């Protein structure tokens, strides 16, 4: 599994080179997804703050990402990946394969033109990377629409994003419904009738933590 900070840095490097995409598709594995699928992934919140829609494949549906899987196989063959002596040589060959795919190879189904000729705007970086583009309120908007049901433990606690919070022993064994309030930086724990049982402060979702992807650290 890739380290989330390595993924973050790689994504930022790609944004600087190619611009900020409108959407990114990934599988449900960490760090992009959450195997339990019981919360919105932190990576989804981070991407939302950049104005990027995160599309998660359906579990056990690899065909959802068929084009990417096929392209990866083609790239590996073009770069002759298995014959590379080291990572540096692999990267050089992948870069050259990508250049040929976009600028040299003429696609019959596209009218025997290159992709660069057909889509020149992609090379103009239409959504340029700027630090100021990061807007934590976009992440908060996504998070605040989620409702997380949680069964209160015998100790009167619930878990949200790998952290235990006390709801109160009198609620043990019951199910509460948790919603994030950006205004309060807190979780609102509601009963089935939408009455607030407890407000639990959680400052992990600060702009700094979201930007640095250190929310769960």
Image: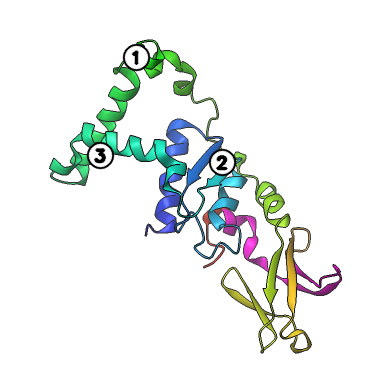
Q: Position of residue 192 (x, y in %)?
A: 82, 70
Query: Which of pointers 2 and 3 indicates the residue nearer the eye?
Result: 3
Q: Secondary structure at mark 3?
A: helix
Whole-angstrom CA distance, mark 1 to mark 3, is 28 Å
Q: Which residue lies under the disc numbered 3?
A: 91
Residue carrying label 1? 108
Answer yes or no: is residue 151 visible: yes
Q: Residue at x 16, y 46 (%)?
A: 86
For label 3, count other residues whose C-alpha is less than 10 Å away and answer few (under 14), some (14-19) or many (20+): some
Residue carrying label 2: 131
- Does the magenta segment cover residue 198? yes
Asked if residue 186 lies left or right of residue 135, the reply is: right
The reply to whether callout 2 and callout 3 are in contact (CB within 8 Å) is no
Lower position in the chain sequence, tag 2 or tag 1:
1
Magenta-highlighted residues: 186-210
- Mark 1: give few (<14), some (14-19) or many (20+) Cα within 10 Å: few
Label 2: few (<14), some (14–19) or many (≥20) C-alpha neighbours in 10 Å:
few
Q: Please, is residue 125 above or below residue 168 in the view?
A: above
Quadrant, the N terminus: bottom left
Q: Is residue 39 above or below residue 111?
A: below
Nearer to me, 146 or 69 = 69
Rendering coords of residue 184 (x, y %): 78, 63
Q: Nearer the viewer, residue 142 or 17?
A: 142
**In the picture, residue 215 is in which quadrant?**
bottom right
């Amino acid at each position: 599994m890739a380290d989330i900070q390595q993924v973050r840095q790689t994504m930022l490097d790609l944004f600087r080179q190619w611009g900020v995409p409108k959407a990114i598709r990934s599988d449900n594995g960490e760090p992009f997804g959450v195997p339990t699928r019981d919360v919105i992934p932190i990576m989804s919140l981070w991407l939302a703050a950049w104005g990027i829609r995160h599309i998660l494949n359906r579990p056990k549906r690899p065909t959802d990402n068929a084009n990417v899987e096929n392209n990866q196989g083609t790239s590996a063959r073009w770069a002759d990946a298995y014959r590379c002596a080291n990572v540096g040589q692999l990267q050089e060959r992948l870069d050259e394969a990508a250049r040929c795919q976009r600028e040299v190879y003429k696609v019959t189904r596209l009218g025997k033109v290159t992709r660069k000729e057909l889509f020149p705007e992609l090379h103009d970086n239409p959504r340029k990377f700027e630090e100021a583009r990061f807007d934590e309120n976009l992440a908060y908007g996504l998070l605040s629409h989620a409702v997380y049901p949680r069964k209160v433990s015998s100790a009167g606690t619930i878990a949200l994003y790998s952290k235990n919070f006390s709801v109160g022993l009198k609620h043990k064994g019951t199910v509460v419904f948790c919603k994030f309030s950006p205004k309060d930086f807190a979780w609102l724990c509601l009963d089935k009738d939408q009455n607030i049982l407890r407000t639990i402060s959680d400052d992990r979702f600060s702009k700094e933590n979201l930007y640095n992807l250190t929310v769960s650290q």
